[in-house]
Amino acid sequence: MKYRTWRKAELHCHLDGAIRPATADELARQQQLDLPRPLRLVAPPDCPSQAAYIAYFDDAIAVLQTAAALERAAFELGVDSAGENIDYLEVRWAPRLHVRGGLTVPEVITAVLGGLAAAPLRAVAIVCAMRQHSVEENIALAKEAGRFAGRGVVGFDLAGDEVRYSAAPQARAFEAARAAGLRLTCHAGEAGEPSSVEEALALGVERIAHGVLGARVPAIVQRIRTEGVVLDLCPTANWKCKAVAVWWYRDQLSLGTPPQSPALVMDPAMVAAAQQDQVVKQRRTAVRPMLDVMRVRPRRRPVATREPAALVPGR
């Protein structure tokens, strides 16, 4: 497979899940952080739950508490992505998790956008609210993020522990984000019950991050199709979080993806299936519709424009 020669768009990449390990170590030393070594940056395959998996973001978040660190991490992510022949990159992260050192939310967003703007590819940002934060805090975040709409921020997301925190109470935050000019996506369907996907759909989202548990309920699959909602999938994370029990291709590939395996439109998990030519064609034709959801155009045309039915779980 000539995976690295394929032009790619990456739509599900967490800034704090893709920091270079060497950069994280250097930042921890510079900031004299009392963190155990080696830093915990890569979740193992035997995570007992999504909550345990999410904990592997903690050390990266700890070192990304200054504007310089955030800008550097964003820039390096752009450089690394371009090196994998990615020419359109959406980076998501939760700004409110990066204010421990005294930064404000606008300063956090500005730093990340600065790094992405300097990177050698088209890169934009999706601001994540957290399920464990209050509705009022997330409404305020949505309004702050909206001030950057058209200036690098294209979307609003909700992430965090799906088992402990429902998405439904955050409806007003999503309304605020929409009113501020942001497109909507939501993490759902990676832990807990398939109903979490329905909760995300009720928020008026155009994309769902993961969504795999929804495949267990035919009515949810049909609703995803009918409403034209796109799923950006992360099979590696789904397997580690126990959302899926079997990862039949896990020993077939070693492609050097960033820590915690952020998903690509043509990510390593998809490459295994790419041995079936029809699946390759389906993945390639999915690129344009997925980009259209956020109304952000790549610099060059993807190969086709069919609807991304292949991305609905179970197909």
Image: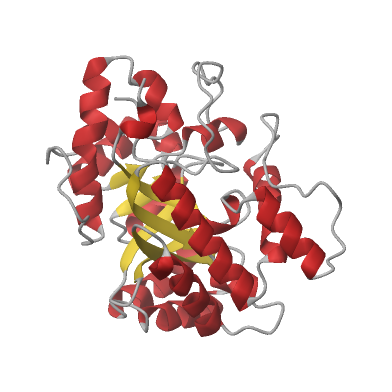
Question: Looking at the rendering, in which quadrant would you find the N terminus?
Answer: top left
> Residue 274 appears in which quarter of the rendering?
top left
Tell me where residue 60 appears, x and y as whole percent.
Answer: 68, 57
Taking depth in this image into account, of 315 and 168 the one nearest to the observer is 315
Q: Tell me which residue sits at (58%, 69%) in the image.
A: 70
Horizontal relation, residue 66 to residue 249: left or right: right
Location of residue 44 with respect to 185 vertically, above or below: above
What colour scheme does the image use?
secondary structure
Horizontal relation, residue 236 to residue 221: left or right: right
- Judge whether residue 166 can be spotted in this image: no
Horizontal relation, residue 52 to residue 288: left or right: right
Question: Looking at the rendering, in which quadrant would you find the C terminus?
Answer: top left
Tell me where residue 187 appears, x and y as whole percent.
Answer: 46, 52
Q: Tell me which residue sits at (70%, 44%) in the image.
A: 52
Horizontal relation, residue 100 to residue 92: left or right: right
Location of residue 254 with respect to 226 vertically, above or below: above
Tell me where residue 169 appears, x and y as whole percent.
Answer: 49, 67
